[in-house]
Image (cartoon, grey):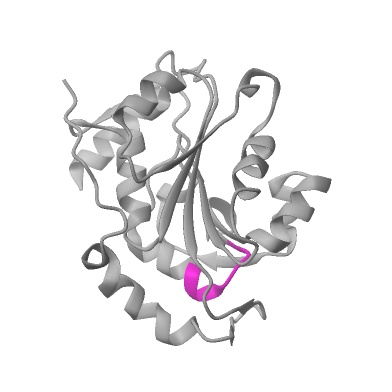
Amino acid sequence: MMEVQKLDLLGPLNRSVNVLEVAFVMWRDYKSPGGHVITQGSRVVGLVLAAGGSSRMSHPKPLLDLRGSPLIIHHIEALSKLCDEVHIVLGYNHEEVLRILPSEVIVTINSQWSDTHPRESLLMALKRLESSDLVFVTPVDVPPAPLKELKRLYTMGAPAVLSHKGIDGHPVFINTEHAIPGLSKGTLREYLVRANRTPTDWSGCLCNLNTPQQWETWCSQFEEH
């Protein structure tokens, strides 16, 4: 049986060191290398898109067992190291997923998950945020991002995309105020065409966990590390 521990996502000791490493560089109206301004007081939010039907996996992806905990919990733990809040969009099988989520996580339910795309789920969650919020966005069916990769994106400034050997990956880093109108007109990929590309040697940013075979392959590599 998977063991789930209660997380204190907003506890200052959990993320103070990580935030301080970048806050003094960027917190006060600092213009990022890509020319995007991060204003004083912006919150940093982690957002996991987990509304899909998991049809190719034949098992709810958020609940996949990784070292005794559900995959969704690993995403929450990873994002909480640098984020003020963690939000999740659920749809398929949301009742079961809700039972294992820490109370601090903010949940949006996409009841039309079977008839919509990830863009709609993303817009639903973004519209609940402050316009100044900076958001790390990741699908649930990818490896949880290491802290150093979140820091790369944060330092580059929103919007930014991890890029491994010239190929875009996840997570992405966006600004709520600019993303909502952009996503209202097109896809996330289209919105990010002009985003900063953040080079990384982490090949996991390109990994998709859509099938049992992909999951088993990645898990074996995860265990090796």
Q: Is residue 155 magenta?
A: yes
Residue at x 33% of width, y 34% of height: 101
Residue at x 24% of width, y 47% of height: 7
Q: Looking at the image, can residue 203 be seen?
A: yes
Tell whether 195 sits left or right of 173: right
Write down the quadrant of residue 133 in the picture.
bottom right
Tell whether 94 sits left or right of 216: right
* Residue situated in front as seen by the camera: 181 or 166: 181
Residue at x 41% of width, y 48% of height: 204
Tell whether 90 sits left or right of 125: left
Q: Position of residue 96 (x, y in %)?
A: 37, 19
In the rendered image, the quadrant that contains the N terminus is top left
Q: Is residue 196 magenta?
A: no
- Residue 54's place in the image compared with 152, above or below, is above
| Count of numbered marks | 0
Q: Which residues are magenta?
A: 154-160
Q: Looking at the image, can residue 214 be seen?
A: no
Write down the quadrant of residue 99 in the picture.
top left
* Residue situated in front as seen by the camera: 197 or 110: 110
- Residue 89's place in the image compared with 138, above or below, is above
Residue at x 18% of width, y 31% of height: 68
- Residue 23's place in the image compared with 168, above or below, is below
Tell whether 90 sits left or right of 158: left
* Residue situated in front as seen by the camera: 12 or 92: 12
Q: Position of residue 43 (x, y in %)?
A: 49, 66
Q: Position of residue 93 (x, y in %)?
A: 46, 18
Residue at the outermost right position: 185
